[in-house]
Image (cartoon, rainbow, N blue to C red):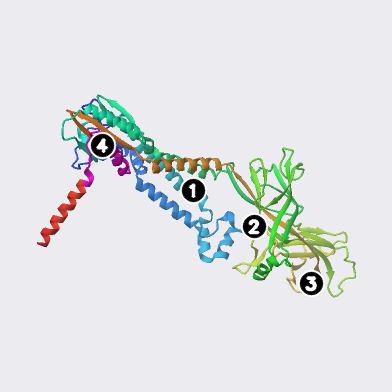
Amino acid sequence: MEKVKCECGHVNPFGTYLCESCGKPLIEEDTPVANMRYEGVARRSQTYNRTIVDKIWNFFSSVKVGIWIIVLLLIASAIGTIFPQEMYIPPGERPTLFYEQEYGTLGKLYYQLGFHNLYSSWWYMLLIAALGISLVICSLDRVVPLYRALKTQKVTRHKAFLERQRLFGISEDTIDADKEIKIAEKMLKEKKYTIRKEKGNILAEKGRFSRWGPYVNHIGLIIFLIGAMLRFFPEMYLDEHIWVREGEEVVIKGTNGEYFLRNDQFIVELYDTDDERFRQAFERTGQQVVKTYQTSATLLRRTNTGAVGVGTELEEVKQYDIRVNDPLTFDSFALYQVDYKLNELAEFTFTLDAVNDTTTEDLSDVVFTVNLYDPEYVYEFDNGYRIEIMEYFPNFYIDNNNQPDTRNMIPDNPRIIFEVFTPDMDPDSDSGELSLIGVQVNEPLIGENDYRIRMIDVDMKHVTALTVRKDRTIPIISIGGVIFMIGLIQGSYWHHRRIWIQNRDGKIWIAGHANKNWHALKRDIDFVASKAAIPIPKDQLDEEQNSEGEEGGNNSDSTKQ
């Protein structure tokens, strides 16, 4: 595909419609008005189609392809909002069970199709990447030849170029063209046009920077998409939840075990039910209304470099009262107060009783406490008795197969299967007595038992829910958004206008072009014509439409006759 050399001497890329320098048409067309959308330059996607690279380039340079990618992204994003994503389901819930139990068959299908983690799925990321590639290729395919054509354009354009502009006119009489052109130049300068002169001819140009508005848009969108994609890297973005019980310390997610948080106290403040201002609200809700809640917390930092666990040395960094919209911040992290749970079961204390006086032995020392968050599974006593936990279900329920199971690891409905061994039993060979114990539940599992495990005390704790957030993508996304708005304003509120005025054999030739808002260009020419003897150009596109309308009317009249 050889380049095309114009009679003016400029060498144009293959496929160029109008010479980039003088504007002479290089390809004959029947239309009276030249296609000036991209200054008649050759776009790569419309010229090359041989190699696989060309085909990929041509595919992504299509605006239709870009629109379809956006449509697919919108549909996929909408599907992701039908049910909550996995990161937003209650902490401790099993996704395999949660979606089916809460939303039935549709929820189960939603989970099986992987929509519970839709926004981090490979195919969703591929769609975002495809949109970014489409924006880059679409922009390069158009902006590079457009910039080259505007940069190399001459002042004196070929007469065929002038004749094929939408606004075109020639003075009827021979006049002192040079004098009138100078007057027109002065008037155009008053309108803030940039004037270029060559051999007595002028090119008045205004608002060229608006032509780059759509491409500035694309740059902003690309930066925005890069920021959005970086959110899938833990070093750039983190949004996790931690539940901290009163008096406990937990490692803060995303800190690689460097920071810990201790819940010193959780406080809930309620509105006074005797306050007349809130009486109607209390009557309407039927319960007390929370005024505020906070976590009095201590931020701790690991001082040694060993593994997290036993022997970890922690130092206090600071104490802070975390409230709603008043987070604890450190390094690039912020801890937000988002939820709480009052009086969560924490410990059960049991004792062992003999049933029907089967033994006279004193069992008052057989007292043990089960931590419902992390229970021990074997309890041995000095008198030879031994109690083991065979099964522990923190949140007990019966599954579809009529088998006991737990919904999650939160002790909302704990059930414990105990096995009791007396001193004369061998735990390695004998079977102990089995009992199922829970809140208001105490049942022998196999026949009647000689011993009964009795609950004598319950300990409960308040639990606070905090969101751990780190977002280093905000500056990138913000910059992308600002650049996008600059491009939007740049392309929407300004427009590119050009006026060519030439002296040809004592007659003034005038032509005008605008990328939009032709009425403003016509008003500028009328303003110049009010002081200078230049012709008022005709709108050839309007004349063509009027001509077509007249022909259509004549055909209609003929049909009626």
Q: Which SS class for mark 3?
A: loop
Numbered tag placed on residue 92 in the rendering: 2
Disc 3 versus disc 2: distance between alpha carbons? 35 Å
Q: Nearer the viewer, residue 405 or 231?
A: 231
Residue 423, given in percent of the width and then of the height, sits at 85, 63
Q: Which residues are magenta?
A: 513-542
Mark 1: amino acid? Trp
For label 3, the crowd category at 10 Å Cα-Cα, with few meaning under 14, some 14 to 19 and many 20 or more, is some
Disc 4 versus disc 1: distance between alpha carbons? 62 Å
* Residue 3 shows up from this direction: no
Mark 3 in CB contact with mark 2 (< 8 angstroms): no
120 left or right, relative to 446:
left
- Where on the picture, by quarter, is residue 205? top left
The residue wearing badge 1 is: 122
276 left or right, relative to 475:
right
Q: Is residue 465 inside the magenta stretch?
A: no
Q: Is residue 538 inside the magenta stretch?
A: yes
Mark 2: amino acid? Gly
Q: First in sequence, mark 2 or 4: give its number.
A: 2
The residue wearing badge 3 is: 449
Mark 4: amino acid? Ala
Disc 1 versus disc 2: distance between alpha carbons? 25 Å
The residue wearing badge 4 is: 529
Question: Which residue appears at 73% of the width and 41% of the height?
Answer: 302
